[in-house]
Image (spheres, rainbow, N blue to C red):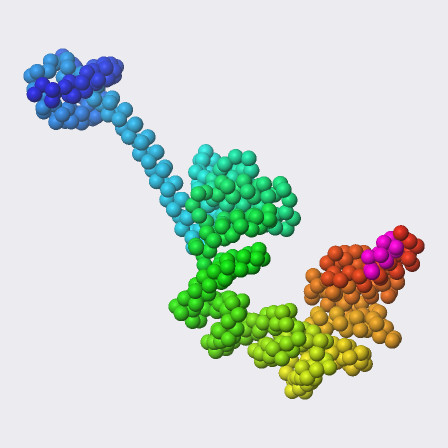
Amino acid sequence: MNFLLEPFRWLLGLLRGFSEIFELLLRSLGGAGRTTDDDNPSRAWWKTALMLPVLIPYWLWTAIFTILSYPLSLSSLGPRARNAFLLGCPAILVFLATVGVAVFSFISYGKINDRYRTQMNVALATKDFNLAKAVGNRLFEPGKIPDPETKFRYAIALDQTGESERASQIIGDLAPDDSPGYFEAHRIQAMTVAGRAGKTPDEKLLERLRWHLEHSGEEPNVAIEQLWGSYFMTVNQPSEAAKHLEIAAKMDPKIYLALSDLYQRSGNTPGESRALRAAEDYFSKKLRDDPLLREERLLLALIQSRMNNIEAAENTVLTGVRLHPDARMKREASSFFIVRYDKIAQSDPEDMASQMKYIENALALDINNLEIYNRMITLYGRAKDTEEGAKIRGMLESMVSEGKSPALGHFALSSIYLLDRDSKKAEFHLNQAYKLNPNLPVVTNNLAWMVAHSEDPDLDRAMDLIQSAIKFAPEVISFRDTLATILMKQGKLDFAIAEYERILAQLPDPRAAHRKLAEMYKQLDQPSMAKLHENKSK
């Protein structure tokens, strides 16, 4: 049984050194605990009281020692060994208590940080970004070094609370351009770079995009696979792009529609058909599960029309209108029929009857849809001498007489009369349209053009009108064309030239603009520039 006593003997040996220190402490306090019969009792009491801070742990350890020494026969221990055991234990208790406090503090610190991290993640999940930022600030106090995931979550909170610059700096540190970093930060970097590359693609941006995509983690991610697809399309590798979109579509079947577009552009008809069927199956199932879904219904109709299942597509849309008889659904359904009109007008422009049917369907759903009137004007230009042309004029006149969207009706009639070269009637209807709704930019633009080109042009009024139109829609190129023309008529040639040069590259047919530029450069005695524009106007 001696082997059972070995741990206790080892412990006694370890404590022997501490006992020497404790004994010296006792002696320094006046020898209390070693008093003789000759000592003054009051003095002995005072010394004992003075030693209480030391004696209390001493007595406590005596009780503990009694328990620990039970396996050992006290008679087997000499007095010195026993005294060493008793006297050294308080010191070791202090040491163990210090270590225990340190360990406890470390564990508590970790638990507090874990709690903060959990609170921040919950706040982000519930989109309480201000709370997530406040909790994250605790994790970023001086002296603390958060892990990469915590830094990333904190950057998201910063970005959502208006500190985008600081968030970008953290993301940049987590995912640099020259060394691998935290994979989720590389994903954000890839998305950011892809946005820039989409606007102005260049070799350096594409290299950065690829670098961040390659370090965005091994686990498949829908957004990253789509970015890979965009990257390979940009570098003209459609087959590689299709591989990544196939992966993305398996995770999110809505992407099958984009995949079908890719196959269509690359001439892969079997791939396009397969992707469309997969998309149709997905959206059909979604609508079976919930017939009230709006976006899914319209996408299904678009897919069905691309698969030339026109009857099913129209039924899908009209069912949506019956389920949602509100203005939003009617506008979306009307836009669907406009898309159908555009497809027929492009593929079979001579099929006037079908084009007219889709215009009537669109008009019945949303009489205030400006795009319908633009299509009516275009169709009238091709069919004004046919039955459909007369029908369009009759529909518009009937609408105006019944007060159904009269402003747009007058606008369309003015354009029709311009096509018929009846400027007086055209100007009358355009003025009526403007009086009914002066906030229609297209009406204001057309009226500005007409006033500037009338027999007795009022250029100041024309300028006020076109500035009003541009204020409503500054991005519309045709409005800028009207402004440049009016400036030219006012004799402000330098301003007119600047306006034309600003929009020249964006005009669908710039030849008329080149003719005007040639004329203005001649008036400004710039023959070389005039000749250059004259050549481009042919």
Residue 56 at x, y = what percent? 20, 26
- What x and y, as percent, mark residue 76? 8, 16
Expressed as whole percent of the image width and height from the top left, the position of residue 206 reads 59, 43
Residue at image x 31%, y 31%?
Answer: 103
Q: Is residue 220 left or right of residue 209?
A: left
Seen in the picture, residue 154 relative to 452 is either above or below; the reply is above
Q: Is residue 97 above or below residue 10?
A: below
Q: Is residue 533 magenta?
A: yes
- Between 446 and 241, the residue placed more toward the observer is 241
Evaluate whether residue 158 shows in this view: no
Vertical relation: 282 (above or below) 175: below
Residue 378 seen in the current view: yes
Q: Is residue 390 in the magenta section? A: no
Q: Is residue 511 left or right of residue 84?
A: right
- The residue depicted at 12 percent of the width and 14 percent of the height is 79
User: Dividing the picture into quarters, in which one does residue 417 lie?
Assistant: bottom right
In the image: residue 450, left or right of residue 15 = right
Which region of the structure is painted magenta?
A: 529-538
Q: Is residue 46 left or right of residue 343?
A: left
Q: Main secondary structure of the magenta part?
A: helix
Which quadrant is home to the N terminus? Answer: top left
Which residue corresponds to the image point at 44% horizontal and 35% vertical from the top-left?
A: 144
Residue 470 pos. (x, y %)? 73, 65
State the count of labels. 0
Q: Nearer the viewer, residue 119 or 292?
A: 292
* Quadrant holding the C terminus: bottom right
Residue located 9% across and 21% down the image = 72
